[in-house]
Structures are given as C-alpha cells and as structure tokens.
Image: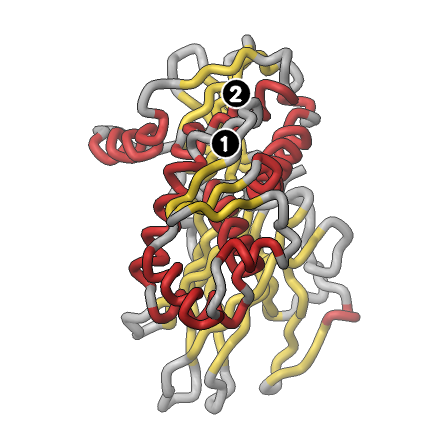
Amino acid sequence: MKLHILHELKINLKKTFTGCGVDTALQEILDDGTVKEFPKNLGSCSGATRVDTDFQRFFYSLFGNDFADSYVKKHRLDYLELQYEFEVKKKRFTLESDLGASIELPQSLIKAYTSKYKQSIQFLIDDSDYVGKILSRDEYLILDKTVMKDIFGPAVKSTVGYLTNLSRDPEMKQCDAIILVGGFVESPVVTGAVKFYFPNSNMITVEEAELCVLRGGVLIGHSNSPETLTHNKFPYGIGMAVPYNNKVHPRSKRFLSNDAYYCTDVFKPLIYGNRQYTYCAFSPSATLRLNRPQQKQVVIPVYVAKNNGVHFTTDDGCSLVGKMAIVLEDRKEGKAKVDIQMTLLGDSLVVMATEEGSLDRTDAAFPLVWK
C-alpha cells in the first residue's frame, strides 16, 4: 500500500506498504514541474502480509503446532485455499461491524482433525482460549469481531505508529491531504484507522488503488526520461587503509605492512551529503588493493557520517551501517584490486564490489539513514 501526503508547499510524501514493508520519500514539486526527492525512511513491517502472518499464528494457536504443521505440509494447496479465503474476508471486515468473519474450512482439514482426535472442531474450541469467540458450524469457522481485531491489531498499530512518528518531522507539519493507494487500502480497517488518528487530514482513496504501484512502475519504464533525482542528506562511504601521509594523518593511526606505512580507519565517501543524485546511477569507484596471497575473503565496512567533514571512521558522527563480505578468486601474483561503488535505490544504499579481472560481482543493500 502506498500513501501520498500532500500539503500546500508542493511537497509530496510517498509511503509504500508493499505487502510487508514501508519506505518513505519526501518529494518537492519544483516550479518547472520537475520533482526533487528527499529520503525520509523509517521502515515498518506493517503491510497486509503482517495480517496474514497473524492469521497463520491464530491457526497454529487454535489447532496446535504439531497438528497444524503436519496438515500444512501434507495439504499445502488446501492450506493456500484457506489463506485465500481469509484474504477475501479480511478486506470486508470493518471495525464498525457487529460480526467478525466466516471462514470456510477445507474438507481435508475437517477430515484430518476429526479422524485424528475423534472429536469435532467445536469440542476443540470449547477446550481452548477461544471459547465464546469462535463457533464451528458445518464447514465454516465463524470468528468473533474481537478475534479479527486481534489479527489486524499489530499491523494497524504499526501503521498508525509509523505515521505518527512521520508527522512529527518538521518538514511534514503542513501536510493536509493523505492519498492512500495499494492493495491494503481495500481494507476498511486501514482506512478507518487513518481517518480516526488523523482527523485533520483530508484522506483520499483512488479507484483501483491496488494497481497504482504497478502502473507507476510501467509509466517510469516507458518514460523517455526515467531518471528520478533524490537529495541525499548524509555521506556514505567505506572504511579503508591508505598510504600514510605525515602531513594529514595522525601518527596514532599509522601501521607498517610490507615495508610501507599506511593509515587505518580512513573514511572514504562515495556518496556525499547535501547533493542531488540520480537513482540507480553508481558512484565513481574506490579501489582497494590487497597484497596477501592467501587471502580468500575481504570484509568491507560501510559507514554513514553526519556531514562531509568526517575524515576517519572513529570520528564522532561516523557510524557503521553494516559490512559486506567479498570472496576473492585465486591469485597467482598474490595481489588483487577490488573496485567499490555505491548507488541510491529507493530507500536503500546498494554497494557493489568487483574484483579486477573477474566477471563476478558482489552486491549488498543497506537501509538509508535519516533524522
């Protein structure tokens, strides 16, 4: 599900619930009609698949882990039919309704349970924590409203919490319209929660909202100018060792290797802060030179800094984002060069490493950092 929040200063916020996750971008519509994008990513597992996961958790809780696991493995297609049945019913469930949902159970599930335990499913319900909340009638399982609310609860709570944190950003103070698109918008629970917790915003839903994300990708793919610009706030780079220079490097970071002095913990930025970049365009490369003949792997630390003035990874304001491991090919001469590049892709920083003379490359993705 995507969310666009608009306000009078021509800033457009785009939030994506792609089933299981959330990414956010702040877009400024310039006077000439072009769009400049500012990353605003928090990340949240609050999409429709989280509701599906909680329905699965409910299924296992009701029937017990051993039976449920055995049934799912033996009747995988029937279990998928059960999940599809819930998928249809969850889009019709509303918090205002007096009823929950009526789920049609696969015949294989009813037969497997009654054959194994020699009792009806209603007997199981009466002996569980769901007594009074679930009713088994013929081939249907009738869920009370409270059970459905418990299944929806974590996803809705995460969604509302995400939007609440987002609304506290100073750049979002003037937003006055929310446009919901994406498959999860079909759920009245989601739209109802957004209306309730953001009463001062004008919420808009569009026809065929579930197709908006797909159509946007197709339009960009067919565009003559598909480049999307983004304004990046923080510099990203790697930590590396460089030849020692006593004029700029502190003596405390000097070390000796192969009869030459090097400086350790140098922050090498590949993407700089407060600059405009094009999504998917890779940065110029930084080259790592390795001299150990038996070295089979090199681990590259990826860092983010608060500003462009950071020189060492140990400086205040420089934080480790993550590490990527590169498997090296056998080298007869005992030397290797690895080129490192970076690009901004959606809400991620993608790092690519290529060993000289090799057709293989190693990729890793890290979430963008923002405050």
Q: Who is closer to the viewer here, 254 or 336?
A: 336
Residue at the extreme top of the image, as rendered:
8
Identified at 57% across, 35% down, the residue is 145
The quadrant in which residue 352 appears is bottom left
Task: Say which residue appears at 57% left-offset and 65% top-offset.
Answer: 323
* Residue 156 in sight: yes
Q: Is residue 369 above or below residue 114?
A: above
Where residue 35 sits, quadrant-wise, is top left
Q: Nearer the viewer, residue 129 or 265?
A: 129
The residue lying at 31 percent from left, 24 percent from top is 208
C-alpha distance separating marks 2 and 1: 8 Å
Residue at the image position 62 percent from the left and 30 percent from the top: 163
Q: List the residue tagged with mark 1.
A: 15
Residue 321: x and y in percent read: 61, 56
Residues packed near mark 2 inside 10 Å, few (<14), some (14 to 19) or many (20 plus) = many
- Asked whether the beta carbons under mark 2 and mark 1 sit within 8 Å of each other, the answer is yes
Residue 344 visible:
no
Compared across the picture, whether 243 is left or right of 70 comes to right
Of marks 2 and 1, which one's residue comes earlier in the chain?
A: 2
Which residue is labeled 2 in the image? 5
Q: Quadrant location of residue 175?
A: top right
Q: Amino acid at mark 2?
A: Ile
From this view, report whether residue 125 is shown above or below residue 253.
above
- Residue 264 rendering spot, x and y as whole percentages: 67, 69
353 and 253: which is toward the camera? 353
Rendered view: 34 above or below 91: above
SS of the residue under disc 2: strand
> Measured from the top left, where is residue 337 in percent x and y?
42, 73
Left-right relation of 163 to 83: right
Classify 10 Å Cα crowding around label 1: few (below 14), some (14-19), many (20 and above).
many
Residue type, mark 1 in image? Lys
